[in-house]
Amino acid sequence: MRSIVLGVLLLCLSSVGMAYESPIKSDSPQDYLVKKGDTLWEISNRFLKSPWLWPEIWHANPQIHNPHLIFPGDLVSLVYIDGRPRLTIVRRGESGRTIKLSPKVRTLPAEAAIPAIPLSSIDAFLKSSRVFASKQELSGAPYVFASRQERIITGAGDKVYARGRIGSLDKNLDIVRSGEVLTDPDSGEVLGIIGHEVAGASLQKVDNGIASLNIKSSQQEVRPGDKVLPADSFSLQTTFFPRAPDAPVEGKIVSVVEGVKKVGQFNSVIINRGIREGLRQGDILNAYKNLMVKDQVSGEMVKLPPEKAGMIMIYRPFEKVSYGIVLTAYEEIGVGDTLKSP
């Protein structure tokens, strides 16, 4: 196929005659053939200096089936439309086509489209971690106190019993263990309590204030004292475009997920901003290092100017905090580093 010539991206001069800096990388390819295992972030990073700018120059070709989704085998190219540069699909691969099978027409489901980020990197956290707004929300929940087999710890296939406020329990339940208390590093406000899901269970019956539960799946052993809560109903959006927040946001990293010491690409962090600050799935924040060094002459400790260390995308916002994945890391990122809208 004849490649579409890639020119230097020039944006129109503004009304006051100022030129806009090109967002296209100097070594951007002419086009790119999408492969299985790719992510939207990786593809946009091949073309753009700031991958989250993808939606601003994306052109959905109306002649192509599912024009807003990208599938393996698609050919993405930089083209000019009405004098403006756009990224678009110029050829649809087999996986993205409408396949005609007489007398029916079968189309590939949207789930086959490439995701925005590597979902495998966050899947475990989505299934095993929740944040509760207060200590009371978790401490007041029903708790496991015994098992049918009278074991200290139990797992999938076992039966356990719970007491407490069991009157409002649903059929599908999560068994959760209390974890880290998250506090704001500046104000000291309690932002939430991490609850680690250790098992999924189903409610069998309630008799004389005791709930009988069957453990359907387990990530860890269920222990006496673990809390029983309605199953988490969160659903991750997979076809969103990474983007800048609607309003300026500044925050800090308050925790590193799974105790990773050296945070790099595709590791997860928790930040002290959430839904109340307007954050949504897909919002991008730049991370900056906050370093104190010793002045070798005066002996004083001096705070260095902030240096950009990477880029984080929010994938699960809660009321006061959010989980984010590190999409780009120029150096190690850690607790206390500053976050700002791009």
Image (cartoon, rainbow, N blue to C red):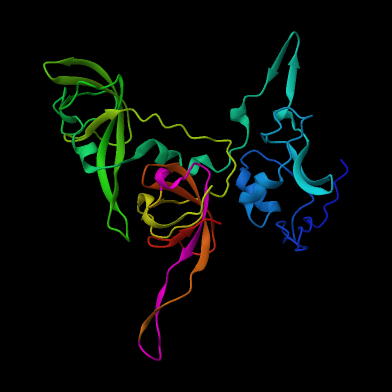
Answer above or below: position of 68 versus 333: above
Q: Is residue 25 above or below residue 234?
A: below
Q: Is residue 227 left or right of residue 101?
A: left
Percent across and percent down for residue 310 are 52, 60
Q: How many marks?
A: 0
Segment colored magenta: 274-299
Q: Residue furthest right?
A: 2
Q: Is residue 295 magenta?
A: yes
Question: In the rendered view of the protein, which quadrant contains the C terminus?
Answer: bottom right
**Res 339 visible:** yes
**Rendered location of residue 144, percent (x, y):** 18, 30
Up/down of 234 relative to 183, above or below = above
276 inside magenta stretch: yes
**Residue at image point 80% right, 48% down:** 84
Residue under the point 36% across and 49% down: 258
Q: Would residue 267 appear left or right of 197 to someone viewing this image?
A: right
**Figure quadrant of residue 165:** top left
Q: Residue at x 14, y 20 (%)?
A: 210
Residue 96, horizontal then vertical, whole percent: 71, 29
Depth check: give the residue in front, 182 or 262. Answer: 182
Tell me the residue at 73%/22% (across/down): 98
Q: Residue furthest top?
A: 103
Q: From this viewpoint, which residue is outermost toward the left?
A: 208
Towards the viewer: 134 or 207? 134
Q: Is residue 155 visible?
A: no
If the image is split into quadrants, where does the N terminus sit? top right
Percent coordinates x, y for residue 47 in the rendering = 71, 52
